Each structure stands twice: as structure tokens, then as C-alpha cells.
Image (tube, rainbow, N blue to C red):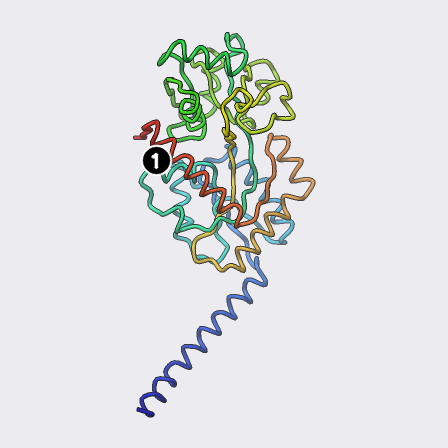
Amino acid sequence: MKKTRRTALAAIRPLAAAIGLATAFGTANAAGYPEQPITVVVPYSAGGGADNAARIIAQGMGEVAGQSVVIENKGGASGSIGAAFVARAKPDGYTVLFDASSFAINPVLRKLPYDAKKDFIPVSQAISVPNILVAAPGSSFNNLQDFIDAARAKPGRLTFASYGPGSLAQMAAELLKKDAGLDMVHVPYKGGAPAIVDVMGGQVDVYFANAASSLNYVSGGKLKALAVSSDKRMPELPNVATVGEAGIKNFNVVEWNGFFLPAGTSPEVVAKLQELVQKALTRPDTREKLAKLGLTPVGSSAADFAKFVDAEQTRWAEVVKTNNIQVN
């Protein structure tokens, strides 16, 4: 019996030593993180809103860290191709996902090659931006209540645009349908630009447009702003009421972007990346560049961002179920 016990202990000691060495090695690596360039995967095309924001923040991160932060675009399938790539990446902190609102919407609409909750660690919400409910400049609607009244008077006849099935632009309108008891028709486009063009021309009645892409058109009189989707009015549009002020409570829909790491990344590296993002977002030059695009820096903690993403997914799951939303 004693011999067997000594043999077992002899076998365990090298294993324990190896585990201790690996833990110490991982902690040492985290202490020096980042020691090589970081690749930030943007799962959307170059030149879009997420890509533009990522490049601004990445530049600030690189200057804070003293390392290159490289943007790699892997678009397609509403962001799920790039997300799947990061989910399979080595969890060492050097392959990072910079995703958008679709990260929380996709799991309730599509079969994905990853588990959004189990395969990723939320690091920090980087930015937020409200949507503006816009109509053609010659539209008879001057505010949200005008539109709601018309939609109730003409069920199934008024239309709303989106930049694709499952996009936040669609989901915001679907939430309005649910909460205001409206019957409207969804007209999806392959991007925000063609949606805006058709709304300007009156081919589609309204569109929850990203403020970063529509504010200039509103200011220039090419689009009419009916409401903003955030819980507070936009400083740039002080006379445009929120959806909540029109009586639709707890609406507060904002587009957002944030950083995620593959599951299995050490807590030390997660904390280091969170700190790096937060420091980049406090830089005056980074904030100025984001402000020019209508983007508000956030820089939340990993814990707060995880709660936010969970709440978003729960909310959109309810809307999808209630409105029976399906995508091809």
C-alpha cells in the first residue's frame, strides 16, 4: 500500500510542477501583454461604420501599447464568418473580434458555426450610436406620432427600410411595431446607402438609419428626422424627440461596437486588453475622430459588457418570437 502511494505521488509531482510552470508562464506572458502585434478582426467590409470605428480605436490602442494593432476584414453572413474565425483562434489575446449589434441578434435568428455565449469573452463595449428614424424631406410625417397615426390608419401599407434582414435597423422597426401595435412592411436592402437613397426619394416611408451615416443628410435637409432611438435626445438634433417621448417606453435602441476574445483567454490578458481599449478611448485625438462620425466612446468593463450583451440578446429574442421574424 505504501509503495503504491509513493508511486502515485511520484507520478503526480511532475504533473503538478508542469501545471505550476504553465500557470507562471501564462501570468508572465500576461504581464508583458502585448508583446507582438494584435490582429483585430472586423467581420464586415472595409469602409463601413464598424471598420471606420475599429481603425480609429486601433490606432489609439497601438500608440498606447507601443505595438501595431492591425485591422483584418473578414466580412460575410452578417458578421458570422469573421466571428467564427476568431472563435477558432488561439486564445492568447492576439486575435480579437470587433463586432457590432449583430453579435447579439444573429444567435436568435440564424444557425451559427459557434456559440456566442460559450465561445467568446466580452472585453469592452467601445462605442454606441443612436439611430434616427428618417423619412423623405417631402413626407407628410413631421414626427413619430404622425407616422404612428398613419400606420394605424393604413395597416399593412406603410413600409420601413433596413440594411439587411436581421440588422439593427430592422430590429428597431420590429420593436416599434411590437410596442406600438403597428402593421408595417419590411423592405430590406443590401446596405445602408441604397436604403437611404430610396427613403430620400420616397420609395420607402421610413428607416431607422445609423446616426453616423445619416446625420449629414438630416442637417442638409435631404432627410427628415422623426425621432431618435436612444433614451436621450442627440445634442446635434436637440429639437428631435426620442421614441420614448412619443410614448413608447423602454425603447432605447443603439448601435454598438465592442471587443471580444476567444473563450479560454486568461483573465489577466482580458484585463490587459480591457485596459488598453479604455486608455485608447480616453485619448483626445481618438475621441475627436469618433465624434466626427457621431460615435460616443463607452469603454465599459468586461463584466458590464457581458451583462449588456446578454440583455441585448434576451431583448431581441423576444422581438423575434413575438413578431415571428425569419431570415432566409
In percent of width and height, residue 172 lies at: 45, 27
Q: Secondary structure at mark 1?
A: helix
> Which of 11/4 is in front?
4
Q: Is residue 227 left or right of residue 112?
A: right
Q: Quadrant of the C terminus?
A: top left
| Along the viewing direction, whichever of 163 and 45 lies nearer the viewer | 163
Quadrant assignment for the N terminus = bottom left
Q: Which residue is mark 1?
A: 109
* Quarter where residue 78 is shown: top left
Does 23 appear above or below 164? below
Give 109 or 53, whichever is nearer the viewer. 109
In the image, residue 97 lies at what x, y percent?
A: 47, 46
* Picture coordinates of residue 153, whole percent (x, y): 40, 9
Name the residue at 31% across, 89% down. Answer: 4
Mark 1 Cα shell of 10 Å, populated few (<14), some (14-19), many (≥20): some
Residue closer to the observer: 174 or 110: 174
Q: Position of residue 26 (x, y in %)?
A: 51, 66
Q: Is residue 287 above or below residue 239?
A: below
Residue 228: quarter of image? top right
User: Who's the residue at 66% across and 44% down the image?
Assistant: 282
Q: Amino acid at mark 1?
A: Leu
